[in-house]
Image (spheres, rainbow, N blue to C red):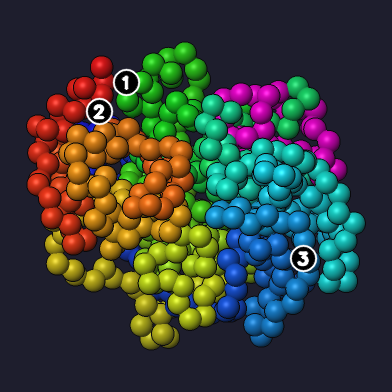
Amino acid sequence: MKASFILLIVFAGILLNGYAGRGVKSSGTHVGIKTKTIAVNLDVPWEIAWGPDNCIWFTAQGGTVSKVNPETGEKQLLLRIADTFRNRSTGLLGMTIHPDRKLPYVFLDYTYKEGKKVFLRLVRYTYINDTLIHPLVLLNDIPATTGHAGSRLVIAPDGKLMLTVGDATNGNSAQDTNALTGKILRLNIDGSIPVDNPFGGSPVWSTGHRNPQGLAFTNLGTLFSSEHGDAIGDELNLIKRGGNYGWPHVEGFCDTEKEQLFCKTHEVTAPVKAWTPVIAPAGITYCGANCAIKEWRNALLLVTLKTQSLRVLKLNDAGTKVIAEQVYLDHEFGRLRGVCVSPAGEVYVSTSNRDWNPGQGYPKQGDDRIIKILPGDSSNGGFVQEKQLKPPLTDGAVVYNNYCTSCHKNDGEGLAGVFPPLRGTQEVLGDKNRLIKIILKGLSGPVIIKGRKYDQQMPAFDFLSDREIALVATYVRTRFGNSAENITGAHVAKVRGVVKK
């Protein structure tokens, strides 16, 4: 079911970068915008937020909190956390600033290491005279790894603190209400547990999350979260009290045979929207009635890593459904991770080109940066980005671009120590059955390729059709300087049958 659906998308225009979802328009009239760089030479600004002093505050993965004056570009360091452990997608991550000036609190979460174990810590600081002091640990010793940390923070309309926590690469923990990983948590701002939480005495608010990378309330108090899927579907979820969002048994919509079996015995909340192929959604924010770009009012603004874009997700009047999606800044500035809106409705985004998995050709001079997005038209320097016509891709290249290039890269060289190369490797050029099995089943745990160790998990792509797997397998065996026999769909079907037994 899902495989045939994906096949239709792939060969009917998937280069639009993302499945628009059920009842969602993927195109429309784009408004003119223009951009202005506010700050440069930053080191992965993971979170950006509008501060109480009308400056943009931002965390850097290496362990610092700073601010930048959006008018002058002047930067100032506010805090350095010495025990931050940074590796791949961990470090100093989420931040939120309490909106009540009478409560001068800043909430941060970061990873730290004790021995060989990595943990996540949530801390409240007090802001006084350009300093962050009096740290109060609210949560400690949350299991973590070098990925899937979640770590977005927001203050709810009722004054509670919300925190996303990824599954720390342990998917089963997402369904365990006694574990804090794979959850969205809710706390009082002093770290105590609200009495009206759904699981008595627990900060757990919702379960079944893989790696929720964005968190935002709308003007109506509806909470949305953007979430990284594994290989099939990234998600935008409307977060409900006590809701179960399915991971690791459901990814995207509940539409495969295995997923439907789980959904028959568990109440799973379906996403508001899902993207296949995945787009790697990062931060989200809400642009309300005062949004400086009027066409973006009552919309969620979502930035993405894989597809390097800003997506405007227009909501219905009830604020519960996405009725249209438009894509901006498509591959203009590289990976985008943070987004915020000022009280005046001005939109800012931050790049993430100096992180552990930069896109092809990044980082560039000046990375990383914070960018202001302004309304514009042809008369005042704005632009409406149009897709440049490029030579049509082969079917195999389409599948590779949609599912493989973010890890193995356009040139097949991978990423040292993390994603193995595809050029001249025995795994690609050797036994065809072995390559097909790797694509079908994925890989986990360390592997040695050409004498070097790689230890990033590869998801299973068994949801792809036999033809798609044959196309991409043939593509990697005949590109990047490789020369090996093609693989047919019939051969894939035969291996798939053996794997299923």
Please give the name of the residue rendered at 41% of the width and 43% of the height, measured from the top-left corner.
447
In the image, which residues are magenta?
Answer: 174-199
Q: Nearer the viewer, mark 3 or mark 2?
A: 3
Among the two numbered marks 3 and 2 on one chain, the one whose residue lies closer to the N terminus: 2
Furthest toward the top, the residue is 265
What label does residue 257 carry, if any? Answer: 1
In the image, residue 105 lies at what x, y percent?
82, 56
Mark 3–mark 2 contact, CB under 8 Å?
Answer: no
9 magenta-colored: no
Among the two numbered marks 1 and 2 on one chain, the one whose residue lies closer to the N terminus: 2
Q: Quadrant of the C terminus?
A: top left
Q: Which residue is mark 3?
A: 80
Please give the name of the residue rendered at 14% of the width and 62% of the height, measured from the top-left corner.
392
What label does residue 336 carry, if any? Answer: none
Classed neighbour count for the residue bearing mark 3: other residues with Cα under 10 Å, few (<14), some (14–19), many (≥20): some
* Amino acid marked by disc 3: Arg
Q: Secondary structure at mark 1?
A: helix
